[in-house]
Image (cartoon, rainbow, N blue to C red):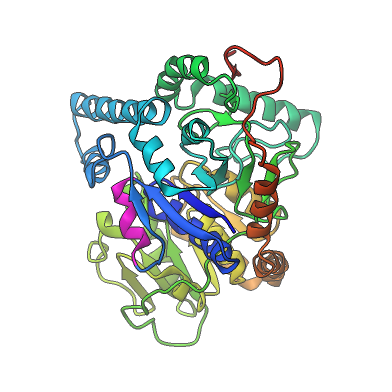
């Protein structure tokens, strides 16, 4: 049995996504530990696994939330916005330096006695920290794979590949555009520091900047995706390993804190995720959803709007509508017939695992790509949050709830998801990869030498 350390981003979505996999591994006798900045600790409350804080200087407790709140302040001046961005870049630089050259993260990884480090693919540089101490490290995707694959578009694209010449050209152009623009200030800091690291550690895993939605490069170590391959588009990449959805359907959640609207009509759950209330257009969107349901008394609506909007800010509500700041999502989905969602992968996977069709209004990050897959597989519909109306939303609700094909296709995908998790596919895949990683996985090919940066052009 192995001691396996998770190193996720300190955010609810990233940590919650790992809990099902952690339970799988623990049930097979592996010892689980977590490392993360201090803001991640509350999301592990109630779980039995030891927690080790890291990056205390770069990411002190609560500072990121303060910066996010300042950035969302109405009427923020250009200079104030610039100052916030500069601080974010400074703190990111501290985190880079610690991962590549610092001693604190290295020491804590040594002290952990880890046999394997599972690094959040969004910030994968600790893969190189693990190399320094001789610990195998894999990239763990809380979304679908992030590195360039010319068979599929980037995840922030709405495009569904068709195999046609036009589709292939569109995918190539999309990846080229990503390479030119995505996270350039962040990539610059990494590019400046990596050559010095590789001079001291020439056998470390190779890095490629042909990626997106990553704060840093993609490394040539196994990429673990917490989804079933049936949900993804067909890829060319050979080192992407699908673990199954790894949804923790047994996680403890409180009951709904208020009574649902009366009646036995279809219940619609609407939630735009943990960051959905921060984005422009959210209030108008929530009001459109309410108006659509108000004109359809046969439906019932349960909506989570987040603290930035606030449940008391949307005016008098129809009798078939309930609005809250936060909803225990699994608890609500078990009673829902439809979810209106931003398309975060956690929410999409939970809908599939519970057989709930979706109407997806993607906001940013990987959500457009997730929405494209929902539509491609017939699991629901999608829309544009800045162009929709109550009439259009109502028509989408009617179409999904009134067409049995959506539920049939969700249930077919549900069977694939549930089977993968029931068989502990994720834990078994990691065990097999870890066995192959001994002797050390990260040795460079003979004759590689020199700097190991790829994708500079």
Q: Can residue 401 be seen here?
A: yes
- In the image as oriented, which residue stretches furthest toward the right? 164
Residue 173: quadrant of the picture? top right
Report which quarter residue 205 is drawn in. Answer: top right
Q: Nearer the viewer, residue 37 or 237?
A: 37
Magenta-drawn segment: 37-45
The residue lying at 21 percent from left, 43 percent from top is 66
State the residue in front, 196 or 64: 196
Residue 395 shows in the view = no
Horizontal side of residue 259 vs 296, given as left or right: left
Residue at position x 21%, y 26% in the image: 83
Left or right for 21, reference 49: right
* Residue 319 on image: x %, y %: 34, 80
Closer-to-camera residue (110/48)? 110
Question: Per the image, is 39 magenta?
Answer: yes
Q: What residue do we see at 61% from left, 65% from top?
A: 352
Query: Residue 258 at x, y = what percent?
Result: 31, 80
Residue sitting nearer the eye, 83 or 372: 83
Q: Give the answer, above or below, for where 69 lies relative to 227.
A: above
x and y, in percent, of residue 437 in the image: 66, 41
**What is the quadrant of the N terminus in the image?**
bottom right
Q: Residue at x 53, y 49 (%)?
A: 142
Q: Is residue 26 left or right of residue 275?
A: right
Q: Is residue 436 above or below residue 390?
A: above
Outermost bottom residue: 263
Query: Main SS of the magenta segment?
Result: helix
Q: Quadrant of the C terminus?
A: top right
Q: How many marks?
A: 0
């Amino acid at each position: 049995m192995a001691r396996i350390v998770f190193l996720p981003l300190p955010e609810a979505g990233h940590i919650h996504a790992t809990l099902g996999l952690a339970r799988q591994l623990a049930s097979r006798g592996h010892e689980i530990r977590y490392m993360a900045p201090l803001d991640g600790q509350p999301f592990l409350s109630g779980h039995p696994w030891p927690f080790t804080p890291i990056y205390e200087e770069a990411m002190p407790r609560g500072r990121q939330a303060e910066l996010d709140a300042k950035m969302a302040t109405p009427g923020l001046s250009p200079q104030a916005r610039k100052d916030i961005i500069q601080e974010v870049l400074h703190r990111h630089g501290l985190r880079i330096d610690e991962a590549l050259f610092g001693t604190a993260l290295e020491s804590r990884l040594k002290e952990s006695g880890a046999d394997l480090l599972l690094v959040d693919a969004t910030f994968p540089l600790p893969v190189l920290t693990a190399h320094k101490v001789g610990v195998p490290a894999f990239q763990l995707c809380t979304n679908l794979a992030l590195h360039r694959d010319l068979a599929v578009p980037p995840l922030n694209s709405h495009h569904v590949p068709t195999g046609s010449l036009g589709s292939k050209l569109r995918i190539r152009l999309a990846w080229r555009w990503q390479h030119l623009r995505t996270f350039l200030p962040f990539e610059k800091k990494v590019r400046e520091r990596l050559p010095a690291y590789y001079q001291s550690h020439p056998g470390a895993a190779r890095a490629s900047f042909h990626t997106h939605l990553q704060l840093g490069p993609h490394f040539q170590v196994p990429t673990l995706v917490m989804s079933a391959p049936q949900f993804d588009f067909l890829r060319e990449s050979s080192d992407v390993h699908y673990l199954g959805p790894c949804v923790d359907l047994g996680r403890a959640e409180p009951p709904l804190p208020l009574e649902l609207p009366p009646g036995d009509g279809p219940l619609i759950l609407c939630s735009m995720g943990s960051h959905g209330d921060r984005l422009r257009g959210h209030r108008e969107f929530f009001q459109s959803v309410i108006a659509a349901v108000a004109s359809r008394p046969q439906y019932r609506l349960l909506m989570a709007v987040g603290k930035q909007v606030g449940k008391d800010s949307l005016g008098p509500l129809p009798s078939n509508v309930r609005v809250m700041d936060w909803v225990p999502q699994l608890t609500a989905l078990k009673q829902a017939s439809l979810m209106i969602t931003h398309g975060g992968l956690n929410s999409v996977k939970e809908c599939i695992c519970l057989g709930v069709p979706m109407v997806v209004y993607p906001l940013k990050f990987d959500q457009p790509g997730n929405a494209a897959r929902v539509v491609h597989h017939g699991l629901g519909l999608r829309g544009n949050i800045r162009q929709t109306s109550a009439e259009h939303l109502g028509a989408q609700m009617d179409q999904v709830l009134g067409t049995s094909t959506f539920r049939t296709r969700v249930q077919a995908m549900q069977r694939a998801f549930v089977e993968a998790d029931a068989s502990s596919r994720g834990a078994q895949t990691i065990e097999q990869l870890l066995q192959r990683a001994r002797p050390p996985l990260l040795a460079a090919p003979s004759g590689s030498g020199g700097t190991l940066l790829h994708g500079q052009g």
